Image: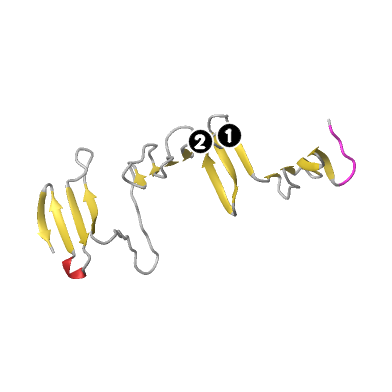
Amino acid sequence: KINSTSTGNIMQLQDSGTDVMVVKDGGNVGIGCSPARPFQVEGFGHFGTASAGVTIGDNSGVASVYGLDAAGATYKPLEIRTGASGTGFYQNTSGNVGIGTSTPNANAKLHVYQGNFIAQQTSGNVFVRLIPQNNNTSYITFGDSVDENNGLISYQNASSLSDDVMGFQVGNSRRVTI
């Protein structure tokens, strides 16, 4: 039992005269710092095992959360969920994000599984923009669990606006070209 009857730090662990852990009067605990909050870590903190866990810290002024092994050598997928099972937000090591799935489609940076994508604005216009580089095509596809490409709307962005083409397709048949 450590008991302090004075104000100031209750406990200080030091390495060569430098505080490595401080317990302040009032209970704030700091690792690598004099804590201003109930628990404060200067640098990065790792929570988990040696092979996987969450690393939290300040990365050059950016608050960062990583899926990372304890040695900081291997990045791991990161998952945030609200229950013991199921999948909420999942990011793999390629940067692809799944919402409702831990296996986001490799061709999509964002994969929403069994849910809707909603863009809502309380006033003014709402935009969903597909912006390819010149001479490439944007697609909106419609499908089901059997065939992901039952229908599509395509827009071919040519180098000249007069050469741009919009198409509407059902099944394997283009129905309208503008």
57 lies above or below 126: above
Circles 1, 2 touching at the beta carbon (< 8 Å): yes
Q: Quadrant of the N terminus?
A: top right
- Give the main secondary structure of the magenta stretch: loop
Crowdedness of circle 2 by 10 Å Cα count: few (<14), some, many (20+)?
Answer: few
- Asked whether residue 137 is drawn in magenta, I would say no
Crowdedness of circle 1 by 10 Å Cα count: few (<14), some, many (20+)?
Answer: few
Q: Mark 1 = which residue?
A: 71
The local secondary structure at tag 2 comes to loop
Q: Report if residue 51 is visible in the image.
A: yes
Q: Residue furthest right?
A: 5
Q: Where, by quadrant of the figure, is residue 86 drawn?
A: top left
Q: What's the amino acid at mark 2?
A: Thr
Q: Where, by quadrant of the figure, is residue 123 drawn?
A: bottom left
x and y percentages locating residue 125 in the rendered image:
34, 67
Q: What's the amino acid at mark 1?
A: Ala
Q: Mark 2 = which residue?
A: 74
Q: Looking at the image, what colour scheme do you see?
A: secondary structure
Q: Residue at x 53, y 32 (%)?
A: 52
